Image: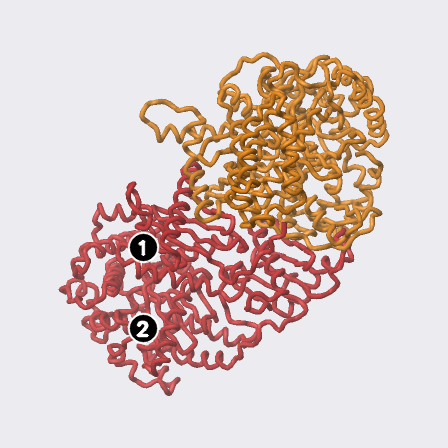
Chain colours: A red, B orange
Amino acid sequence: MTEFMQPDSRRCNYFFLYDGSKVKGEGDPTREGICYFYPEETPLDEQELLCGQLAGASRCVSELSSSPVRILRLRRNNFSIRMKDDFFWALGCSVEVPTISVCELLDQLINLFCFYSGSVRRSYQLNTQETLARRWAQYLSHLESASSELHHIFSCLRTIDSTNIDPLLLLKAALILQACQRCPLVSAGCILFRGRVVSTQMSPELTMKVMVHESETYAKMQAQRSNGPSAFSSFGGAVSSTSVFLTMSELQYLQSAPVDKHFSSRSTPHKNTPPRKTRLSRTLSDTPSPESEPSDTGSSQSPQKVSLSPHLSDSSVFSPDPSQSAADPPPQQLEPPFSNGKHSPVAEEEVLEESYYHSFHSNGDGVGPMHDEGDGSLCGEDSHRNGGGGDGDAACGTVFESQGDNVLEEVSGGGCGDVQCHEAEIPDPPRSGAFDSQEECPRIPMTLYLHRVKGLVLALLVEPHFLSDKDSMEEVYHSSLASLNGLEAHLRTISPGAPGTPGPYIFAHFDCIQSTLTTNLSGRPGGAPQRPFVRATSLLHSHFCNTETLQEAIIRSAGAAVYGTRSVAQETYFQQHGGSLRNSGIPNHQDSAFSLPGKARHRLLKHGVNLL
Amino acid sequence: MKCLLIASESAEVLFHWTDPEFQQNVQEQYGASQEDGQGLPAFEDSISTLFAPIIISCSTMVDRLDDSYTSFTTENNHIYVLHQFDECLYIAVNGDGEEGEGDLRRKIYVMKKMLEVLFGMVTLSSNLLRKELRPQDTEQRARLWKFLQSLLETYSHLRENDQSFLVEAVERLIHPTLCEQCIEFLERRLVQQLNSSAERAGEEVMHAFILVHTKLLAFYSSRNASTLSTSDLLALVIMAQNMYPSNTDQDDPNPEDVESTSGSGPESFYTPEPSPTDGDSSSSGDKPVRGSTPVFEFVDPDVQMAEDSLQTLEVPPPDPSTPRRVFLEVSLKDGLYPMMPHSMYCLPLWPGITLVLLTKIPTSAVAMSVYTFLEAFAKLEKRLSDGQEGSAATRGQRTIHEVRSKLDKFIKALGPSEIQSGQLQRDWTEFKNLAFTRGGLGFSRHLIPSCKKMKTQLCGVYRQCFLLEARQSDVPQRLSPGLQERAQTMVQEKLMDWKDFLLVKSRRNITMVSYLEDFPGLIHFICVDRSTGQMIAPSLNLTERNTSELGKGPLARFIKSKVWGLVNTTRRYLQKGYSTVTLRDGDFYFCYFLWFENESGFKLEAGDIPILPDDSAPIGMLAWDYYRKLLRYYSKNHQGEVVKCYELLTVHLGVIPAEIILQHCRQLASKLWEPSRNPLL
């Protein structure tokens, strides 16, 4: 009767992506359909067995119920399932992890993939399985790296311990982000310190996605640093970028953020128009070199940028040459195709995407994406970017569609020239149809820009042509550099502080809005007194998720009594150590378990948790 | 959209039950995939085709990964629960959100329990069970399946509407004087008279009880009888309800017909299609008894549809006095014997009131022997397959030599009877040759197939003795019809004056009114004594005609759904080792407590409660007696003490301070069992 569960630090036991379209015929071997399988060392036989059986049985059930399977349980594993098009994802966790968390984890994983790679089908057409396998593995290990068992229950953002930190620093971080947003090409951003969020303007889900890339570049940087002191704080070394894909709703969320561009544009003249001067006056280390281009070309960190910048900076609105800037959009379109034979496919893709986006902007409302120009042009840009006007929205829609077409065009065309692809802006009917029907929600390409100052990272979601817009880039870079350095210096000095000065109680406080977790539980798994707390939390969390009306609960086993309470915005769990747990279990109002709500209210105040 | 399916490993459908919606869905799907104009194939074929891939995949998973599916959930919230018992795979489906995973798993276990009650040890041999569940004769199969389907529906109906089936404990009518009188009557007059009659044909009445709807008025067990387990009693109540359903808790379709002054409403019987006397045991004895003139009323569309799907049968009415063979647990001094054959006589007194007699049949000693041998072979097989050999394999309570001589005698004794034991004899000789002779292999792995054969043969003998025998012999063993009639009349006479009272009382056994003054803010409670398997709770009748204290309509239904939900929730926590739960949910405050006492009422310290996996047997007493195991587990640390286990669930208004609520619970716990301390069971 007793089957005490063994704690397992690894929450994911299996993860695989199976492409049913590859296994249609009788003779097709199952292995053809396996796109990725974790753990990778699993014998192929077992991989085939699991993929084949799970996908087959799920398909059968889906047909019976005319709805895709979402959860599949085995005796020893709970699988969260996603069935879309012909793809079949399955993520299997040990039965201890609440099912709801397994489902969240799988969604996160797929969303992460789509965020960095766009459509799954297209990625598999474009890239080798090995390349994409590395990505899945990377995302999985990132999500797995959650430090404690509580993180297995709540998919939360890791934030810096705000109780330990001067609030002014948080304010400063927020200000840096706001300053960056003055550049109209910058949508939103976040600041991370050593893999933890300091401040963010994005939704928790988006921030979480951005953090994956940050941790990747951090790892790379560490590796480089160990190799030797490479160009660390040079523009190139500190800045990197990657293309990302946002869903419509994510983009809308970003655009709806209350950024007052009018204000920023008006304020720019006296703050930023003579930006170079201010910058110079502010930081001594900031030599005039940033204004010269060589630092760009010399960067070895982001090859795509290297190859792009010489050309694109020419056509940039911010180019010092007035004649070019005035005639910006048309010349670019009319320009003959330049040689791009050296570009890697990815880089090429970006070139195209950027240029399409750019050309849309230019064509769409005849206003270049500039912010230093007159107010009028800025208005146009603003309304468009914020989705304020109905026209703007409609335009966006069309552009995204045509964007998809272009991408496809590019996929099939391989190394097609620039002009050719511009022409392809006129949708290619048959292809576009096929593509659109596959993609339920179109994903909009954006660029993720990262500026690293040691452990501190400024991550910005920017319009794709931001990278080609050298002036904007420099401006963002230089206007934030000094503040970032300062912030980093301050944050570095703050001792991480043992977060759980273990009191006579354990608590966990989950902020559902910001997806943050506050707890005094140490990250190391398996502490004996923690197990009952984690188990109870896991059960209560599932219960809260399934029962909308449930507000608070006290549950007691022989070992521990745990109090859980939640509101729309938060979930809090509390367990008091010690005390006499000797009780008969019969209802008794003097029982210590029932004083937990009061104690929690009292004790948690000093952790900034208000339960009143 | 609901379905329950039993399939063999080779994906053969051994039983299915579907609601009309599911049936329609399957037919549509089948029609769509088979549009070559051949018309719809038989429903059974389509359902088997649709489920076959899942069933086969399931056994592949077991064979190759040693893991198996326990459930599927789709995005539109259809739930499929799978469970394998030996070689039979049970699949329960819900597509209308009315049942959760736990409910479906429970339904599967209840179905298995009912099969055990009906087929006894035959269920231990998958091969024989397959034959029983899927008779070659289609008419017979249709009859059997219809009977099982209606049992399942009766159970589902009770679980959804009757609090005693919600918590799986027996509810007694609270009327100490009358109860005591009735028990005395059963003991001194009825059982004594029956057992001293010459017309009992060797049967002996062991238990007699009177049911008013699903509630127990009186229960008497003869002195040499073992106690009837709660699990068996609940199963018998389901069977009695299936024979003589009371529609008290169903909304009456024609309220104007109803004479509502008595408060009891119209009572009517639904009698399943009668079956032939010579036929199978599963459908005999279902007819209401002469003397009463029941109104035959049948309105359940689900049942109607299920019937339509089967062939309409023209069968002669059964002999009403034929008892139903049931297999119940017997605990004797020398051990526990599960699935011992009994005869169940279900005698309706009035609509809604039934007398049930359980008799021990003369040949039941054979069943005990068979069980002993089966157990010995099963143990041996297990040891051998664990890799133990020689004397290590034969170590145990009974030495294999003892079994040998007993089995020799047993087979010898069977010889002259009608039971075909030739194959058993041959297999036993083979076993002995392998195991005991010098040239044989002795006790090693090679003996395993032989063990299996012996088990099958023993089950076969058991089947002949207790399932086929009862069907085939021209003069079935039973209390004579005259004797049954006399018993019925005696109890009718005794209860004549109480009849109407009892029917009302059963509906309003206890009411919240009597508690409101002492416990302001208390809305509902359920208290269960798990050691005796009894429960007590204010009535929650939600028919249009009857108003409970909760009023009627949406509010009452809402509270009912909350109570049902609370029971499920607390079971979930109990499964994970939590014996105290309080919840603030919307405008309500729910409490759940489980505690242990010794016989003198001293509260024992709360102990560890085992943590069970998600797919473990459901917590309850009907299909799998969780509480019996819990008590045994807890008692390990309380040797020499009789340990009792109680549960209390309460629903309060959320505005009442938690402290007051807890005080209420305390008082309620101590007050509730006072009136029932008298020996009613």
Q: Position of residue B255 (x, y in %)?
A: 65, 21
Q: Which numbered disc covers residue A396?
A: 1
Which residue type carries mark 1?
Answer: Cys
What is the crowding at mark 2: few (fewer than 14 residues within 10 Å), some, or many (at least 20)?
A: some
Residue at screen point 72% across, 15% down: B480
Secondary structure category for the residue under label 1: helix
Q: Position of residue A142 (x, y in %)?
A: 43, 64
Outermost residue, left side: A336
**Image mark 1: chain:** A
Looking at the image, can residue A140 be seen? yes
Which residue type carries mark 2?
Answer: Met
Q: Quadrant of the C terminus of chain B?
A: top right
Alpha carbon distance from label 2 to label 1: 24 Å
Q: Nearer the viewer, residue B210 or A547?
A: B210
Q: Position of residue B613 (x, y in %)?
A: 58, 50
Q: In the rendered image, which quarter is residue A24 located in?
A: top left
For label 2, the residue is A473
Tell me: A35 left or right of B100: left
**Image mark 2: chain:** A
Tell me: B477 left or right of B220: left
Q: Nearer the viewer, residue B335 or B55?
A: B335
What is the crowding at mark 1: few (fewer than 14 residues within 10 Å), some, or many (at least 20)?
A: some
Tell me: A587 left or right of A215: right
Q: Position of residue B448 (x, y in %)?
A: 52, 42
Image position of B132 with respect to A540: above or below: above
Secondary structure category for the residue under label 2: helix
> Are the residues tagged 2 and 1 within 8 Å (C-beta)?
no
Image position of A216 with respect to A69: above or below: below
Looking at the image, can residue A376 be seen? no
Among numbered discs 2 and 1, the one appearing first in the sequence: 1
